[in-house]
Image (cartoon, helix red, strand yellow):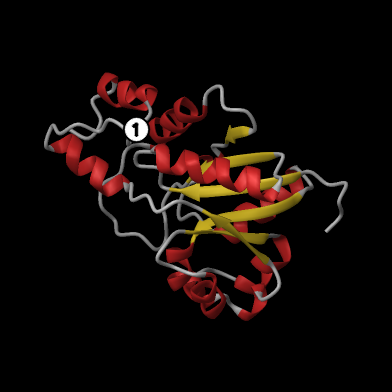
Amino acid sequence: MSSNNLKIGVFGGTFDPPHLGHLSLAEAAKEQLGLDEVLFLPASRNPLKSRRAIAEGHHRLGMVRTLINGVDGMAASDMELTRGGVSYSVDTLGELKMVQPADYWFIMGADSLKSIQDWRNVPRLAKLCRLAIAIRPPLTEEDVRIRIPADFKDKWDLVHMPATDISSTEIRDRLARKRPVVGLLSPGVAQYIQQHKLYP
């Protein structure tokens, strides 16, 4: 990879809702890999997730923008939402490369490696980016090494994270039961959810 190129991390997900765990992962990836920018890309529809009802795309994008507002080196894109349909990482990276030539890292949690063989066109994806794999205890580097597809054998970097356990599922559950979400959501996102009456 050319050292002159911009270094951009691509952080895709449903972001339903985006939480402080997402932000800390983006910041850790940016710092540890020396990225110029982390681009959040809310998915139109994740091909590997169930078809449960999710918040509308413009709200998930609005919450992401609220989460990263004022944070240096963070940006959000509506590319996948505008394209619609199922969101495939390989299509998104291909489009990004055309629009903004750069060195790209695809940011993901180590737990997502379980399903990477089900992703579309892994060999092409490996030509478009490196993987930035967030690892938390109890998972180890060896766990990651075992699961990496052959195409990405020399194209991955670890992002070390503290053992935190924040999930969007738990947050939706807490909101539905009117339980506190302090420390899980940024105040801005909590306010956005309240204002737009999301997750009743």
Q: Quadrant of the C terminus?
A: top left
Quarter holding residue 19:
top left
Residue 188 picture location, percent across and down: 38, 22
Q: Quadrant of the N terminus?
A: bottom right
Residue 90 picture location, percent across and down: 61, 61
Residue 62 picture location, percent across and down: 44, 28
Quarter holding residue 179:
top left
Element assignment for label 1: loop
- Give the total of numbered labels: 1
In this view of the protein, can residue 83 be seen by the observer? no
Q: Compared with residue 197, is residue 4 higher up or lower down, i.e. above or below?
A: below
Q: Could you tell whether 104 is left or right of 47 in the image?
A: right
Q: Amino acid at mark 1?
A: Leu
The residue that appears at 45% across and 59% down in the rendered structure is 136
Residue placed most toward the observer, 52 or 143 = 143
The residue that appears at 68% across and 50% down in the rendered structure is 33
In this view of the protein, can residue 72 be seen by the observer? yes
The residue that appears at 52% across and 40% down in the rendered structure is 82
The residue that appears at 44% across and 68% down in the rendered structure is 139
Residue placed most toward the observer, 169 or 89 = 169
Residue 138 picture location, percent across and down: 40, 66
Q: Could you tell whether 44 is left or right of 130 in the image?
A: left
Disc 1 designates what residue? 185
